[in-house]
Amino acid sequence: LAQLRRVVLERLMRYYRFLSETTLRRPAKTVTSGQIAEALDIDPTQVRKDFGAIGLLGMGRVGFEVCEVCRGIRHVLGFDEPYEAVMIGAGHLGSALMAYKNFAGYGLDIVAVFDNDPRKIGSKVAGRTVQSMRSLKPFIRRHNIRLAILTTPADVSQKLVDRVVSAGVKAIWNFAPIQVAVPPDVFVRNEHISLGLSEIAYHLAQEI
Amino acid sequence: LAQLRRVVLERLMRYYRFLSETTLRRPAKTVTSGQIAEALDIDPTQVRKDFGAIGLLGMGRVGFEVCEVCRGIRHVLGFDEPYEAVMIGAGHLGSALMAYKNFAGYGLDIVAVFDNDPRKIGSKVAGRTVQSMRSLKPFIRRHNIRLAILTTPADVSQKLVDRVVSAGVKAIWNFAPIQVAVPPDVFVRNEHISLGLSEIAYHLAQEI
DNA sequence: TAGATTGTTAATCGATTAACAATC
DNA sequence: TAGATTGTTAATCGATTAACAATC
C-alpha cells in the first residue's frame, strides 16, 4: 500500500464523515460512488480511485458496502489503533480541545494536560488535573506518549517542542501561531489560524 | 489581477508571517526569493511567481524590498480594509478566538458574541457581553455585518447559518464539526478539526 | 437480458520545477 | 566588469477528469 498524500487523507475523512452521518439518518447497505460524489462535490471517478487505493472493491450495478468502506477507512487512517496524547497548554483552546468528545472515536485519548500558570496547575480541565510543565518530560517518558498537542503562546512553543521531542514524541499537532522546527523523523501538522484568516479576508475584500 | 487560488493565498500568508517575524528580529531592507524559499521550504521560482502574480517586482542582484512586499500582500489579502464579524457561540472555542489579539492586525474585528445558554448571556467574554441568539439577526442587519464565525455544536449550526445568511452575511468561518449548506454567493471556510486528526492518526499508525 | 455501476486506461488540466537570457 | 538575482518561457510532474470495456 503506497503512502497516501494529504489531499487523499482529507478526502477519505470526508467520505467517512459523510457515510457515518447519513447512515445514522437513513440506514443503507450500499452506496455508489456517484452518490458520494454528488454529496461532497467531488468527481465520481475520484471516489472510486481513492477507494481502490486503499483496497476497497465495489460491485457493478450496486456500488460499495457502506460498512466495509467505513471499516476500510478506519483501518487505513489508523482510527482502530488507540494512541495517547498530552495537551500542552490549558488555555481556552486547550480546554476546548480537551472537552471535544469525538476524539475517542478516532483513536485519540488525551491523557494529561500541562500548563505553566501556577493558578491553573492543580485545577481540573475536562476531568484531568492540570500538571506543571516540569512533569511534562518525565510523563511522556513514563507513558511512552507519541503525540503532543500544542496550544501555547508563540514565544514558549519552540522550547516546549524541543523538550517533548527529546522525550520521545513522534508527532506534534501544532495550534500555536508559529512555525516550529523538528527533526526529520517527527511529524508536524500545523493548524495556523492565519491561513484561514487569509482566505476569509481575501474573499471579503474581493466582494466589495 | 486574476482570482488567486487557495494555495497561493496560503503561501502569501506564509511569506507575510515570515517577513514580519524575521524583520522584527533582524531588520533588513531587502530579501531574495532564495532566502524566503529556504526558510519556508518552497521553490524560489514559486516565490517569484507568486510575487509577480500580485504585481511585486524585484531588483536584479538585490531581491525584493521587504516593506514593499509586506504592503503588497497586506493590500491583496485585504488586511487594510477592516471588517466586522460576529461570533456565534461563546463556548471554549469561541472564547479562545475572542481572546486572540492578532486578529486586529489582519483587519478583523469581532464586535459581538452570541449564545443560547441563559447562564452565559449577560456575562463577558474578552470584554464583550454575550448576547442572546434572538438579537443575532437584528444585530447583523443593523451593523451590516458580512462575516459570521461559527463555533456552535453540530446540531444547531445549519439553522443558525440559515438565519445569518438571510440577515445578509456573506462569509462563514465554520469551526462547527459539520458541513453547512449556503447559497452560491456566500463563501464558507471550513476548519474541521477532523481533517487534521486524520493526518495525525494516519502518520502515527504508519510509524509503528 | 438490459442497464447501471465499477475498475482502469488515456487525456486533460494545472501546478511545480528547471533553464536561461535580461538586469542591476 | 563580474556575478548574483530576477522574470519568464519551457519542461516536468502529479492530480483530476473523461472514456469505455468489464461486470453484476
Image (cartoon, coloured by chain):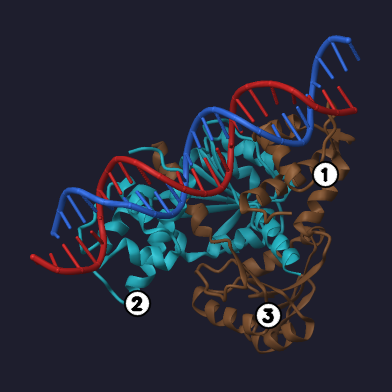
Chain colours: A brown, B cyan, C blue, D red
Q: Which chain carries label 2?
A: B
Q: Mark 1 lies on which chain?
A: A
* B29 sits to left or right of A158: left
Write down the quadrant of residue A119 in the picture.
Answer: bottom right
Write down the quadrant of residue A79 in the picture.
Answer: bottom right
Mark 2: secondary structure: helix
Could you tell me the amino acid type at mark 2? Arg
The one nearer the camera, A116 or A166, is: A166
Callout 2 crowding tier (Cα within 10 Å): few <14, some 14–19, many ≥20: few
**Residue A26 seen in the figure:** no
Q: Name the residue under label 1.
A: A69
The C terminus of chain A is located in which quarter?
Answer: top left
Q: Are marks 2 and 3 on the same chain?
A: no
Q: Nearer the viewer, mark 3 or mark 1?
A: 1
Q: Nearer the viewer, mark 2 or mark 1?
A: 1
Could you tell me the amino acid type at mark 1? Val
The one nearer the camera, B142 or A184, is: A184
Mark 3: secondary structure: strand
- Residue B6 vs B60, above or below: the answer is above
Callout 1 crowding tier (Cα within 10 Å): few <14, some 14–19, many ≥20: many
Q: Do labels 3 and 1 share a chain?
A: yes
- Residue C11 vs B147, above or below: the answer is above
Give the residue displayed 44% in from the left and 64% down from the top. B40
Q: Mark 2 points at which residue?
A: B25
Give the numbered dot on residue A114.
Answer: 3
Could you tell me the amino acid type at mark 3? Phe
Q: Do labels 2 and 1 share a chain?
A: no
Percent position (x, y) of residue C8? 71, 36
Write down the quadrant of residue B3 in the picture.
Answer: top left
Give the numbered dot on residue A177.
Answer: none
Percent position (x, y) of residue A91? 62, 72
